[in-house]
Image (tube, rainbow, N blue to C red):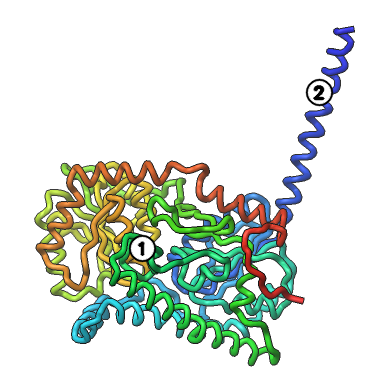
Amino acid sequence: MGSTVRAAAQRTLPTMRTLAILLVAIFAVNVQSARILGLFPHTGKSHQMVFDPLLRTLAERGHDITVVSFFPIKNPPANYTIVSLEGLAAQGVETIDLSYFDIQNKLLNSLGIEKIIKQIFDFQPLADMATAICSNIVDFVPLANAMKKSYDVILVENFNSDCMLGLIHVYGLKAPYISLSSSAMMQWSADRIGVTDNPSYVPLVSSEFTSQMTFLQRLENTILNVYYKTWFRYAIQMKEKAIIEKRFGRRIPDLQEIAKNVSVMLVNTFHSLNGVRPLLPGVVEVGGMHLDHSRKPIPHYIERFLNESEHGVVLFSWGSLIKTATIPQYKEEIIVNALSKLKQRVIWKYENSDEEGTLTGNILKVKWIPQYELLQHEKVIAFIAHGGLLGMTEAISAGKPMLIVPFYGDQMLNGAAATAIGLGKAVSYADMSEKSLLEGLQSVLSPEMRMSARRASKIWQDRIADPLDTAVYWVERVIRWGHQIPCTPLPGIWVS
């Protein structure tokens, strides 16, 4: 009797395994057949660098991807369709002249309220950029053709524009949409998903505060919170709504209401670096999802420079948007004089360099650097950066301490966050002197700071899942369940 049962069980087991494999295959096909539309209307290259790994991974998992962007990827897979926005606006690559900040600092210092006015000045170009791009894309035929198709989910960058949300409504796309942010949540983003952004302890993305603010800092944070929300509504949302209505000859709902349709927000932060915020299930932190673990090769002349260093190397880069070679001569002399006093060697991303770098003393200036690969290199012991979130993420991933010289946007906030967790120290560009820069470097290069940075890195890496895997999971979860995911408590305006 027992042998008969065992024999029957053995015959049944392969059948059950086959059935399980078939069920998994059916489920995989259902997921892999999903059609995904990605809409990325911002001209900043660093923003697109955050999203590209997610889009490529979704394509590799079998999804049919259509991506609208100013920065189309190279060698896309067969199931990856590109709608390039190139030519509709100037791309943000090495476009910022550093002499601008000297002029701005002199002007604002004369007014006596430079910090508040600077934040307002820094954000104003985002409104002009958003409305100019919106005016162009409403007539862009390739975009219109892409939006006339049906999709299972739509990915939309959430930064300085809601024009794409208006177009989603105009073309009647019924798919749920996911909001992607390359930075911490913007001041106008919290309301659309019902998140509390109490300015008494939630610092603005443009501030240099942490959650531990003085009364005057809370007051400034509150005033600017109200200002930015009002500014975004009237300088961007209402104007974009008018542009769309004029182009299509009909009224559309308030973009602020359409924005509440969001199913999930994927935000390029993680609380151990960027600070704790009150969030909802629909706000998912995926800071670090852009990190490329495949490791690109380091140019041979840089590798040689690294290996020949006796005391280690300091990496110096101010990102993809700032053109470092435009730095005023007196500022460059301050930096060179301070760096030359270090026993460490320095690799400086400096666009006006020779093909294989320009070596002066202990400083090697190079046109381009494989930044993440260099930060992972054992010879690189510190990072001079501008506080952009991608560089911050790469540094904390590698456990390398930072000297941060912030210029605009979220860089002051990131610098304050890094200082708070012992990852680095911030130095003002406006007030930078040889003394302050050298003291900052000595602090960052100290054994205590290097140990603190390694500890911050371990805490940052200790999470339940890889950030890219987390982002993929949430996209596919929305594909599976659509509008049924109860991630936002707010009603929006659905297309009819």
Of callouts 2 and 1, the N-terminal one:
2
Label 1 crowd (10 A; few <14 / some 14-19 / many >=20): many
Q: Position of residue 22 (x, y in %)?
A: 79, 38
Using the rendered view, name the quadrant where residue 402 is placed.
bottom left
103, above or below 300, in the image: below
- Tell me the amino acid under the disc marked 2: Leu
**Which residue in the structure is indicated by mark 2?**
13
Q: Residue at x 75, y 45 (%)?
A: 27
The quadrant the N terminus occupies is top right
Judged left or right of residue 388, residue 467 is right
Q: Position of residue 264 (x, y in %)?
A: 60, 60
Q: Residue at x 30, y 61 (%)?
A: 416
351, above or below 52, in the image: below
Judged left or right of residue 209, residue 482 is right
Q: Secondary structure at mark 1?
A: loop
Tell me if residue 478 can be seen. yes
Q: Secondary structure at mark 2?
A: helix
Q: Tally the numbered discs.
A: 2
Q: Position of residue 36 (x, y in %)?
A: 67, 62
**Which residue in the structure is indicated by mark 1?**
388
Quick one: 332 or 475, which is closer to the camera? 475
Q: Residue at x 32, y 49 (%)?
A: 375
Q: Residue at x 48, y 58 (%)?
A: 278
Q: Position of residue 39 (x, y in %)?
A: 59, 70
- Tell me the amino acid under the disc marked 1: Gly
The quadrant the C terminus occupies is bottom right
